[in-house]
Image (cartoon, grey):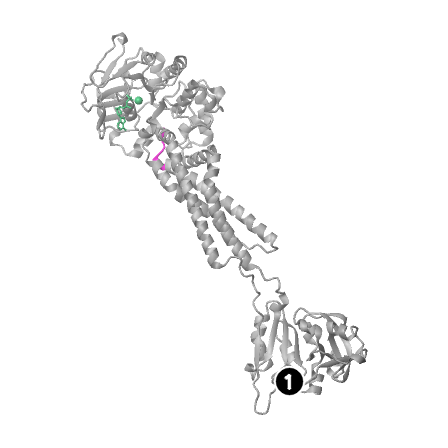
Amino acid sequence: MDEVVAAHEVGLESMSASAQPVVVRMTGVRRRFPGPPEVIAVTDATLTIRAGEHVAIMGPSGSGKSTLLNIMGLLDQPSEGTYLLGGRDTTALTDSARTRLRQETIGFVFQDFYLMSGRTAQENVALGLVYTGLDARQRHAIARQALETVGLGHRVHAMPSTMSGGERQRVAIARALVNRPSLLLCDEPTGNLDSATSAHILEILAGLRGSGVAVVTITHDPMVGAGADRLIQITDGRTFDPEPEHVGRSRQAVAVGSDDGAPARLPSVVGVRPPADVGQPVPRPSDGGTPVIPRSTHSAWHVWSAVAGEAIAGLGQKVSRTILTLIGTVVGVGAMVAIMGLTSTAAGQIDASFTALEATQVVVNDAGTPSPGGFVNSFPVDAVDRAGALNGVQACGVIQPVPNATGVVATDMTPTSLGVNAPVYGATRGYFETIDATWSDGGPYTLFEEDENLPVAVIGASLARQLGVDRAGGTMFVDGFVYRVVGVVSGVSSRTEALMSVFIPLEGMQERYGQPTQFQRATMVIHTRVGAARLVASEVARALRPDAVDAFAVVPPADPPRMKSVISASMSALLIALAGVTLLIGLAAIADTTLVAVMERVGEIGLRRAIGAFPRHIMSQFLLETLAIGFLAGLIGTSIAVIGVLATAISLRWTAIIDPWIILAGPFLGAVAGLVAGAFPAWKAGRISPIAALRR
Ligand code: ADP
Ligand code: MG
């Protein structure tokens, strides 16, 4: 390397060309494009290019210049012949070895610049290092330096759209140089520029002379040809014009094929050097405009994070299209989440008429069958104590309609209207608690009154109003007996008929009117702690009568009556299927947009491949783009759906119930949809051949 630099200081012109290592050595290279019709674009190209040489290739359109350059740049392979790059036989290399060699050794400059709109000059130049494994900070530092060397230090953050053609080409040259190539290949670099601007570009290329980089320029422009150390004339094979005014420079003729399929062969006459120096390493320019920054942190991690960065940047560049692409997936995922959320929310609602008390009430009916001696009450005398001892029982009472009673109730206040027909019950005092009685006056009879068989009564508020005894302390007649009213029940949570009834202590009632009959049986009502009802129901019969469990029919509380789901199960299955179809449409939209984007970005793909991207980098970039689109769509759809379910629940005064897994599954579903949608376009993008991509 030192030797090379020393040589540059003396000046390339004065040096013997043979002192420089060979960069490019082609022998008998032929490129055949299988038809139909078959085209032989390059026929028997034999040439040698040395480090530091500036070579111009001139020839009419269609004469095979670009094909030759693509082969030189390892974008294409010869059908026949050998191509040694820096002494390495490239024809034997695998695809990935050629990609790596291309990334390390070659820089490209194209007529069309291939700058990415929406990225600053610096970002465009840094792109040249994306696949090298340098971290972003280093990439940008090198890019900035490279921009300075092409005279654009002041336009680092300019967008390509704000730059002139010449400036854009300078950005492209900077991008080609950041990798410190040994070989810079320029395909019509001034083809789109006016002559003044072209001159500037040529100056920049000429400025590379000190760096040792071999520069090969395809051109139509005689000015470009004149600036080169050597001119290689490419013709369709029939013309061979040594151009005498360029005497003093070496000349080389390359025979190339013609489209008519009758290629002429012309042996290469000049420039082939003895193979002595073949095999030397390709010199790496160390100064002269290419930045030298220590590169110690090459890593695969940086390559992949750079690829991810490219994917995100790709999305950011076409926000409106990205949003449009999202819609189908947003709706699909959103509808699924919303349907599931609404279904579970509706199904979780307890009917408004349901009260917690109902879920805590156990009713024990006497299911005894009449024996030959007559009907016998199944409830033992200490039934209330036995049931009350069960774990979870809060209150417990027994009630029995008065057997054979006329049920005539009267008061002493209204002797004239002796007769309101109202139901009369014997009830233990615990009964009032089980129906959650509230009292407008007084309360239940006391234990003492119960035990002593005192003639006391509790009366329902509606009946009391009718009879004019709505205060405790008054007296009333039941079936001709006098009772003292101790309490007026004004409200109950169940058994509202209590408000129209009279209750007297059960034991006293049974002494006066007799034991329950087959048709007027006793019933036990139990109020349990919340959640204990089922257990109490299963145990109570055994607690009451271990000897005759079958004597009771226990009615546990009904399950809380849930809202009949607004959306029936089959309906919701149908809606989910519809949402699935929407998701599929969304998926197709992503696939379609991505496919279009791949086709639109063929140039970008070609450029990336030229810069050193492997097919897997290209594929990953597009897959990451669709993955991100899908994930974003899933996230948006899920958020909208959750908000929708919440709003619905709030407006109906329901409790929103959404399985957290569904909320997590939404974005995941979107991401999977994105991956599936992106698979085919990404595969296609990875397969695009760089030469096809860069062809116009
Ligand atoms: P130049 O750059 O000198 O204008 P090219 O190298 O692009 O010429 O093309 C040389 C010839 O090879 C042309 O006739 C062109 O049509 C043909 N050619 C180039 N690439 C392909 C290809 N991929 N398939 C078929 N023919 C091709
Ligand atoms: Mg061309």
Examine the rendered structure and indicate whether residue 477 appears above or below residue 285.
below
Please state the horizontal and vertical placement of residue 38, each as a whole percent of the image: 21, 28
Q: Residues within 10 Å of mark 1 (few under 14, many from 20)?
A: many
Please state the horizontal and vertical placement of residue 109, each as a whole percent of the image: 36, 22
Q: Is residue 74 left or right of residue 537?
A: left
Examine the rendered structure and indicate whether residue 405 appears above or below residue 147.
below
Residue at the spot of label 1: 516
Dot 1: element: loop
Q: Is residue 341 left or right of residue 391?
A: left
The three-letter amino acid code for the residue at tag 1 is Pro
Q: Is mark 1 within 8 Å of ligand 1?
A: no
Q: Is residue 428 left or right of residue 682?
A: right
Quarter the C terminus occupies: top left
476 or 127, nearer to the observer: 476
Please state the horizontal and vertical placement of residue 509, each as a whole percent of the image: 70, 84
Task: Please tell me which residue is depicted at 50% across the width and 54% down the height of the picture.
Answer: 340
Magenta segment range?
Answer: 611-616
Task: Please tell me which residue is depicted at 48% across the width and 59% down the height of the picture.
Answer: 569
Is 349 magenta? The answer is no
Ligand 1 quarter of the rendering: top left
Quarter the N terminus occupies: top left
Task: Please tell me which residue is depicted at 59% across the width and 62% down the height of the picture.
Answer: 351
Q: Quadrant of residue 204?
A: top left
